[in-house]
Image (cartoon, rainbow, N blue to C red):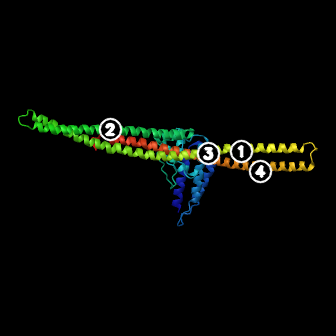
């Protein structure tokens, strides 16, 4: 038991010594947590069947949070591309580690900074590599999403690739057909000429035979090459183009429906505003008419005047009821319009990302087709 306790304390002490080499971390919260960590390790019961390390790990998490808060407050953290489920576990990242970034910017050697890696955690996560191409794609996505016409630009780019692919396919197919027609004509010419050259007393027969063999070899090579190009490049590109058009059209239909729903809601909102203004004007006119009747001279009969007032009061009440209905309708449509705008923002984000993903796949397919169609002799 003593051996285990001393070994654990030695590991903790080594880690804390490495941390306190830097004056930035010699703060009261970190010192207090380090003392608590030492005491928690001393309190571990190694003589039992199972050792409860929960208090130790909790203190380590708090210590990591304190260290990261110091780094973040000094604005020295470069970037953390992968966010774990809890902020206290950020120090467990081996790559893109915040402490390592801080030490690198402080001019400390990598060999020393590596000692600040957490030694006691069994949780090891390996984030994916974030190369320049991924950063460029993310910048394009952000640019498209920030533009009001970002989705339309993405669709135009996707359509341009489809048109470009269609033109390239048409050209390559026509060129392949020309090569195959030429090869067939050459083969026919070789067969006819070979019969003529095999007649007796023909000079330079061996030279012509070698030439014919070369032509036949060229025809065979042309056929293999064109078939390779047709299968590996043309047909593959045409299939990918059709899939691309299917996805693009489906996304465009979805986007068009979402935009139409938004425009319909906006039109309904404008109509409800006009209706509400009309109801307010009707209430205003009804009240003015009622006031005129009340302020009219008393020459008229009292019963008739009372009937007129009751009638105009009913008109005012009906106008108020209609106004309240218009206000309720206005509130309902306003809430629906807000929801539609939130939905269109989400749809815009998702659609732009999907279209750009298709465009990225097309670029990858272009590179793959270029590789597969080059140097056909290797296949």
Write down the residue under mark 3.
264
Judged left or right of residue 247, residue 261 is: right
Q: Upstream in the sequence, badge 4 or badge 3?
A: 3
| Above or below 7: residue 323 | above
**Number of marks:** 4
On residue 321, the disc is: 4
Write down the residue under mark 2.
174
User: Residues under labels 1 and 2: Cα distance?
Assistant: 63 Å
Front of the two marks 4 and 2: 4
Q: Upstream in the sequence, badge 4 or badge 2?
A: 2
User: Residues under labels 4 and 3: Cα distance?
Assistant: 26 Å
Is 122 or 284 nearer to us in this picture? Answer: 284
User: Residues under labels 4 and 2: Cα distance?
Assistant: 74 Å
Residue 198: in sight, yes or no? yes
Q: Residue at x 59, y 58 (%)?
A: 55
Is 105 or 276 nearer to us in this picture? Answer: 276
Quadrant of residue 375 within the rendered picture? top left
Q: Upstream in the sequence, badge 3 or badge 1?
A: 3
Front of the two marks 1 and 2: 1
On residue 275, the disc is: 1
Q: Is there CB contact under 8 Å for labels 4 and 2?
A: no
Q: Is there CB contact under 8 Å for labels 1 and 2?
A: no
């Amino acid at each position: 038991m003593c051996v285990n306790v001393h070994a654990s304390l030695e590991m903790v002490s080594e880690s804390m010594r490495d941390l306190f080499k830097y004056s930035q971390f010699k703060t009261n919260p970190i010192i207090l947590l380090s003392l608590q960590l030492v005491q928690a390790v001393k309190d571990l019961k190694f003589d039992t069947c199972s050792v409860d390390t929960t208090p130790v790990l909790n203190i380590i998490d708090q210590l990591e949070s304190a260290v990261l808060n110091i780094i973040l407050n000094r604005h020295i953290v470069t970037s953390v591309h992968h966010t774990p489920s809890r902020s206290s576990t950020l120090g467990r990242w081996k790559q893109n580690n915040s402490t390592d970034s801080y030490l690198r910017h402080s001019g400390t050697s990598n060999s020393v900074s590596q000692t600040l890696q957490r030694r006691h955690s069994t949780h090891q996560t390996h984030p994916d590599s974030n190369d320049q191409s991924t950063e460029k794609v993310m910048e394009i996505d952000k640019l498209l999403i920030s533009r009001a016409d970002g989705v339309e630009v993405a669709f135009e780019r996707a359509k341009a690739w489809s048109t470009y692919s269609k033109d390239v396919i048409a050209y390559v197919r026509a060129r392949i057909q020309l090569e195959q027609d030429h090869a067939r004509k050459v083969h026919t010419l070789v067969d006819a000429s070979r019969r003529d050259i095999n007649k007796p007393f023909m000079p330079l027969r061996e030279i012509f035979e070698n030439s014919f063999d070369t032509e036949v070899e060229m025809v065979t090579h042309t056929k293999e090459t064109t078939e390779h190009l047709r299968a590996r490049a043309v047909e593959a590109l045409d299939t990918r183009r059709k899939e691309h058009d299917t996805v693009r059209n489906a996304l465009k239909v979805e986007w068009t429906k979402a935009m139409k729903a938004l425009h319909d809601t906006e039109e309904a909102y404008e109509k409800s505003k006009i209706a509400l203004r009309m109801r307010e004007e009707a209430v205003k006119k009804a009240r003015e008419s009622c006031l005129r009747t009340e302020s009219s001279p008393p020459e008229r009969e009292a019963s008739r005047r009372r009937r007129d007032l009751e009638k105009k009061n009913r008109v005012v009440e009906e106008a108020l009821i209609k106004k309240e209905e218009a206000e309720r309708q206005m509130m309902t449509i306003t809430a629906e319009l807000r929801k539609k705008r939130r939905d269109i923002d989400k749809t815009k984000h998702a659609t732009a990302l999907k279209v750009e993903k298709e465009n990225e796949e097309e670029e990858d397919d272009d590179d793959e087709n270029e590789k597969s169609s080059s140097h056909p002799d290797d296949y």
